Image (cartoon, helix red, strand yellow):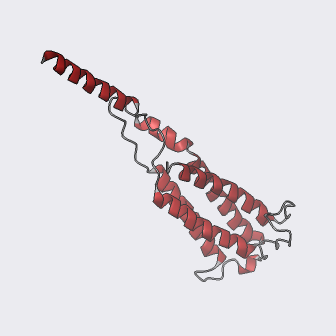
């Protein structure tokens, strides 16, 4: 009977080690469908803004006093991306697997601050803010028939803003989707 108990304990210990051996500390944020949905919604609205200004706009039509003015649209976009930044920064710290060392709040803040989404959203807010200010001061020339997405870039300033935005948005969305493992 003693040898059966020893074998059972040995098997139990072996199972625990195998179980714990398969666990790895996760130092990446958890996937958040609400962040992905927020990014997609804000992207649709931002690309609509690019389509609007690519036809050419003047400063005198920037703030027409309506809720649909370009000024109101820019401010809504900036607010949406800032709200997404807050959501990204407020992600909960993962619980460490049993038998591993805890992740400190300081370590978690480093993870959050170096995740691509945070930096990309910071840059997007900056790009959209600069674009709003440029639109208000000078408007934008129309994008030529070549367009911003062709191999021959259009010299229009709006294309520069669109390229900077798209590069950072793609980085943020790619990272967020990669978290859905």
Which percent across, then down, holds residue 36?
A: 52, 59
Which percent across, then down, holds residue 113?
A: 53, 43
Relative to 156, 120 lies left or right: left
Which percent across, then down, holds residue 32?
A: 46, 55
Q: State whether residue 138 is above or below residue 115.
A: below
Q: State whether residue 137 is above or below residue 22.
A: below
Looking at this view, is 7 or 53 the one in front?
Answer: 7
Residue at 17% across, 16% down = 3
Relative to 42, 180 lies left or right: left
Q: Which quadrant of the view contains residue 151? A: bottom right
Relative to 173, 130 lies left or right: right
Which percent across, then down, holds residue 79?
A: 54, 65
Residue at 85% across, 64% down = 154
Q: Which quadrant of the view contains residue 102? A: top left
The answer to whether residue 100 shows anywhere in this view is no
Q: Residue lying farthest left?
A: 1
The answer to whether residue 92 shows anywhere in this view is yes
Looking at this view, is 97 or 169 the one in front?
Answer: 97
Residue at 87% across, 61% down = 152
Looking at this view, is 156 or 65 the one in front?
Answer: 156
Image quarter (top left, top right, bottom left or bottom right) of the N terminus: top left
């Amino acid at each position: 009977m003693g040898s059966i108990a020893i074998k059972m304990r040995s098997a139990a210990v072996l199972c625990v080690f195998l179980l714990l051996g398969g666990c790895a500390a996760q130092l990446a944020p958890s996937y958040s469908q609400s962040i992905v949905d927020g990014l997609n919604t804000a992207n649709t609205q931002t690309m609509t803004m690019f389509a609007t200004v690519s036809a050419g706009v003047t400063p005198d039509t920037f703030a027409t006093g309506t809720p649909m003015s370009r000024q109101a649209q820019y401010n809504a976009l900036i607010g949406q991306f800032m709200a997404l930044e807050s959501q990204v920064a407020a992600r909960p710290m993962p619980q460490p697997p049993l038998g591993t060392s805890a992740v400190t709040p300081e370590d978690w803040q480093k993870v959050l601050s170096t995740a691509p989404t945070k930096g990309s959203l910071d840059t997007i807010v900056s790009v959209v803010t600069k674009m709003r200010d440029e639109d208000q001061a000078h408007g934008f020339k129309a994008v030529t028939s070549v367009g911003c997405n062709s191999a021959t870039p259009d010299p229009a300033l709006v294309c520069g803003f669109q390229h900077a935005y798209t590069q950072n948005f793609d980085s943020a969305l790619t990272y967020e989707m990669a978290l859905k493992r």
